[in-house]
Amino acid sequence: MTYSREVTNKIVECWGLGFTAEETVTAIQEWKNIHIGLATVYRHRHSLTAKEIIDELMRKQMRDIAREDNSAVRMKYRDKLLAKLIPQRIEADVKSEHTERQIIVQMWKPPYVEPTTGT
């Protein structure tokens, strides 16, 4: 089934707002009273249009960080951006009939670099 541009834009918009695929399906059902499947949501999320939107938002964010005059502020927001892009920690409960333990995997975290002032 083919959906209108309005519906496909809403899928990408929900993704940008941080909705899960299931939340996106529910939001569109409440908004337009139509049913779309999870496969449709995933397909549109990985479409060229969605990738172009994400790339443009990332480019604007990086430009804003680079144009900031205050290096402390620039480094703060660079670190925040990296923290969102790089997973920090993954937890998994491993259970079997003989043992039960929790596994925590620490992911790489960029080192904090003190901002320097120009001399």
Image (cartoon, rainbow, N blue to C red):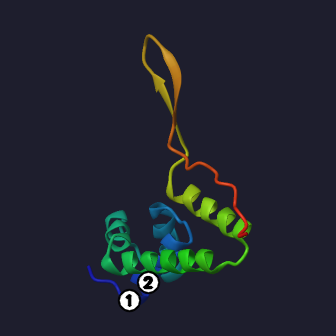
Q: Which is nearer the eye, 63 or 16?
A: 63
SS for callout 1: helix
Quadrant of the frame with the N terminus = bottom left
Determine which quarter of the picture holds residue 73.
bottom right
Q: Is residue 107 above or below residue 13?
A: above
For label 2, the crowd category at 10 Å Cα-Cα, with few meaning under 14, some 14 to 19 and many 20 or more, is some
Q: Which is nearer the eye, 83 or 34?
A: 83
Among all residues in the image, which is located at the extreme front? 119
Q: Is residue 112 above or below residue 43?
A: above
- The percent coordinates of residue 27 (x first, y second) are 53, 72
SS for callout 2: helix
Q: CA distance from mark 2 to mark 1?
A: 6 Å
**Residue linked to disc 2:** 9
For label 1, the crowd category at 10 Å Cα-Cα, with few meaning under 14, some 14 to 19 and many 20 or more, is few
- The percent coordinates of residue 19 (x first, y second) are 53, 66
Residue type at numbered disc 2: Asn
Residue type at numbered disc 1: Arg
Residue 33 visible within the image: no
> Relative to 18, is 6 on the left or the right?
left
Q: Are marks 2 and 1 in contact (CB under 8 Å)?
A: yes
- The percent coordinates of residue 4 (x first, y second) are 36, 88
